[in-house]
Image (cartoon, rainbow, N blue to C red):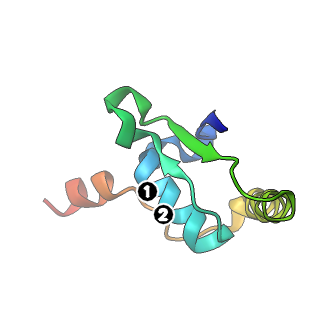
Amino acid sequence: MFAWVPIPEQFKQLGSLEFSKLLIEKADVAVAPGIGFGEHGDEYLRLALVENEQRIRQAARNLRKFFESADRLHNVVPMKAGLQATG
Protein backbone atom coordinates (compact mmCIF):
# COMPACT_ATOMS: atom_id res chain seq x y z
CA MET A 1 0.00 0.00 0.00
CA PHE A 2 1.16 3.51 -0.78
CA ALA A 3 0.11 6.93 0.46
CA TRP A 4 0.55 10.19 -1.43
CA VAL A 5 1.11 13.09 0.94
CA PRO A 6 1.65 16.77 0.22
CA ILE A 7 4.92 18.36 1.26
CA PRO A 8 4.32 20.65 4.26
CA GLU A 9 4.04 24.29 3.25
CA GLN A 10 7.28 25.34 4.96
CA PHE A 11 9.24 22.85 2.81
CA LYS A 12 7.47 23.18 -0.55
CA GLN A 13 10.18 25.47 -1.93
CA LEU A 14 12.63 22.55 -1.67
CA GLY A 15 10.65 20.36 -4.04
CA SER A 16 10.07 16.67 -3.52
CA LEU A 17 13.60 15.47 -4.33
CA GLU A 18 15.41 17.78 -1.91
CA PHE A 19 12.79 17.29 0.80
CA SER A 20 13.14 13.51 0.41
CA LYS A 21 16.91 13.85 0.87
CA LEU A 22 16.33 15.97 3.97
CA LEU A 23 14.08 13.29 5.49
CA ILE A 24 16.72 10.62 4.90
CA GLU A 25 19.42 12.78 6.47
CA LYS A 26 17.51 14.20 9.44
CA ALA A 27 14.76 11.63 10.16
CA ASP A 28 16.24 8.37 8.84
CA VAL A 29 13.09 7.84 6.77
CA ALA A 30 13.16 7.07 3.06
CA VAL A 31 10.29 8.21 0.85
CA ALA A 32 9.82 8.44 -2.91
CA PRO A 33 9.92 12.00 -4.27
CA GLY A 34 6.80 12.78 -6.26
CA ILE A 35 8.80 14.30 -9.11
CA GLY A 36 9.85 10.78 -10.04
CA PHE A 37 6.23 10.15 -11.07
CA GLY A 38 5.91 13.22 -13.30
CA GLU A 39 6.22 16.97 -13.11
CA HIS A 40 2.87 17.36 -11.32
CA GLY A 41 4.10 15.18 -8.46
CA ASP A 42 6.75 17.60 -7.22
CA GLU A 43 4.62 18.88 -4.33
CA TYR A 44 4.05 15.33 -3.03
CA LEU A 45 5.86 12.37 -1.52
CA ARG A 46 4.94 8.73 -1.89
CA LEU A 47 5.11 6.73 1.31
CA ALA A 48 5.35 2.96 1.01
CA LEU A 49 3.57 1.19 3.84
CA VAL A 50 5.13 -2.20 3.12
CA GLU A 51 7.20 -2.79 6.24
CA ASN A 52 6.14 -4.54 9.41
CA GLU A 53 4.17 -2.56 11.97
CA GLN A 54 7.16 -1.96 14.25
CA ARG A 55 9.20 -0.33 11.47
CA ILE A 56 6.27 1.80 10.33
CA ARG A 57 5.76 3.01 13.92
CA GLN A 58 9.48 3.83 14.18
CA ALA A 59 9.32 5.82 10.94
CA ALA A 60 6.27 7.70 12.26
CA ARG A 61 8.13 8.53 15.50
CA ASN A 62 11.14 9.74 13.51
CA LEU A 63 8.94 11.94 11.33
CA ARG A 64 7.20 13.39 14.39
CA LYS A 65 10.58 14.28 15.95
CA PHE A 66 11.73 15.81 12.68
CA PHE A 67 8.64 18.04 12.39
CA GLU A 68 8.81 19.04 16.06
CA SER A 69 12.35 20.32 15.53
CA ALA A 70 11.92 21.58 11.95
CA ASP A 71 11.92 25.24 12.97
CA ARG A 72 15.49 24.78 14.24
CA LEU A 73 16.88 23.52 10.91
CA HIS A 74 19.64 25.65 9.45
CA ASN A 75 21.23 25.82 6.02
CA VAL A 76 18.30 24.24 4.23
CA VAL A 77 18.39 25.88 0.81
CA PRO A 78 16.70 24.50 -2.28
CA MET A 79 19.20 23.56 -4.97
CA LYS A 80 17.38 25.66 -7.60
CA ALA A 81 17.62 28.79 -5.44
CA GLY A 82 21.27 28.12 -4.63
CA LEU A 83 22.13 27.77 -8.31
CA GLN A 84 20.27 30.94 -9.23
CA ALA A 85 22.05 32.91 -6.52
CA THR A 86 25.50 31.93 -7.82
CA GLY A 87 24.73 32.10 -11.53
Report whether 85 appears left or right of 14.
left
Instruction: Report the side of 15 relative to 74 (left or right).
Output: left
Say which element carries label 2. Answer: helix
Is 20 on the left-hand or right-hand side of 29? left
Counting from the top left corner in percent of width and height, residue 71 is at 70, 59
Residue at coordinates 70% horizontally, 47% vertically from top-left? 49
Q: Position of residue 15 (x, y in %)?
A: 43, 45
- Mark 1 and mark 2: Cα distance apart in space: 5 Å
Q: In the rendered structure, which amino acid carries the disc numbered 1?
A: Glu
**Could you tell me which secondary element the residue under label 1 belongs to?**
helix
| Mark 1 in CB contact with mark 2 (< 8 angstroms) | yes
Question: Which quadrant would residue 65 be assigned to in this image?
Answer: bottom right
Asked which quadrant contains residue 72, the reply is: bottom right
- Residue 67, placed above or below residue 25: above
Residue under pointer 1: 18
Q: Determine which residue is flagged by label 2.
A: 21
Q: For this rendering, which residue is in front, 2 or 30?
A: 2
Viewer-proximal residue among 65 and 72: 65
